[in-house]
Structures are given as C-alpha cells and as structure tokens.
Image (cartoon, rainbow, N blue to C red):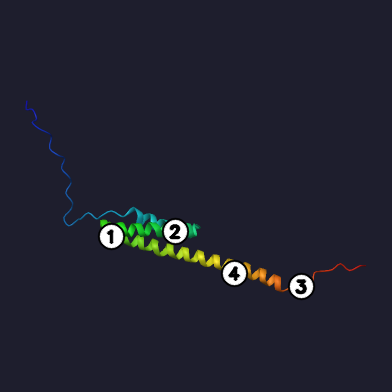
Amino acid sequence: MQTPSGPPPPPTQAALPHGAQTQPRYNVWAIVSVAFAASTVIGTWCLGGLVAVITGHVARHQIKQSGERGAKLALIGLIAGYAAIGLTLIFIVAYVAFVLFFFVFAATHSHPSPSVSPQ
C-alpha cells in the first residue's frame, strides 16, 4: 500500500477547442442601461430615461477602464434615454402651451351667457 505524499494534484481544466478564445463578460451597467431605455416604451418615460442615461455613462466609463463588453449596449441606452427625456420635456411644454392657450382663449373670447326669458 502506497501513502500519498503532499497535497493532491490540482484538477485539470478542460482544454478549449483549437482557436476558441474566451471573451470578456458584459458590463452589468450597460445591460441595466439598455433595459431601462427599453422600459421607456412601456411607460416609465423620463424616469427610465434618467436611469438609462446615468447607468449608460457609468458603463461607458467602466468599459474604457476594464475592457469589458457592452459598449454598444451602453450607447443604445444613452441614445434612447436622452430621446425619452427629450420627448418628455417636449410633451410637458406642449401640455403647458395648450393649457395657457385654452385659458387665454377663454378669457379673451367672451360669449353671451344664455339668459332665461320670461314667459
């Protein structure tokens, strides 16, 4: 009977097929950015756009430093986020303009009120 001397050998790793390379993982913030940008379609509008823009900028900064994947996702998140913010602001301006127009129109165009005629 033979006794083992020293620690056991490390487990062998499976060799990659010839020519296969491992790619860096996706940046999590890039995925979050594009997900919140997509959520603007279902109604989060400016809130989703703000989160998409913030996380998109964080992702692009981290990707430049770490070399992770996801630069295109972060860019898509930024573009869609800024578009959502812009559309929200345009909607707010149009809404305020409509309300002001309505009140100005109502104040400047007086119509005679119906009067009750004696019978």
The quadrant of the picture occupied by the C terminus is: bottom right
**Which numbered disc flags the more N-terminal residue, 3 or 4?**
4
Q: Which residue is mark 4?
A: 97
Say which of 3 and 68 sits in front: 68
The amino acid beneath tag 2 is: Leu
Image quarter in which the N terminus is found: top left
Q: Amino acid at mark 4?
A: Ala
Gap in angstroms between the C-alphas marked 1 and 4:
43 Å
Are circles 1 and 4 on residues that touch, CB within 8 Å? no
**Circle nearer the N terminus (2, 4):** 2
| Residue drawn at point x = 12 percent, y = 37 percent | 9
Q: Nearer the viewer, residue 50 or 21?
A: 50
Labels 2 and 3: the sequence-earlier one: 2
**Which residue is drawn at the image coordinates 42% and 63% (left, top)?**
80
Real-space CA distance between mark 2 and mark 3, rounded to the nearest whole angstrom: 46 Å
Write down the residue under mark 1: 64
Residue carrying label 3: 111
- x, y percent for residue 104: 66, 71
- Residue beneath label 2, please? 50
Where residue 28 appears, as percent x and y from the top left, is 34, 53
Which amino acid, by three-letter code, is at mark 1? Lys
The reply to whether the C-beta atoms of the residues labelled 3 and 4 are less than 8 Å apart is: no
Q: Position of residue 2 (x, y in %)?
A: 6, 27
Give the class, few, some or many, for how many residues have Cα within 10 Å of label 3's Cα (few <14, many ≥20).
few
Give the structural element (helix, strand or loop) at label 3: loop
C-alpha gap between disc 2 and disc 4: 24 Å
Observer-nearest residue: 54 or 45?
Answer: 54
The CA span between labels 3 and 4 is 23 Å
Q: Which mark is residue 25?
A: none
Neighbor class of circle 2 (other Cα within 10 Å; few <14, some 14-19, many 20+) is: many
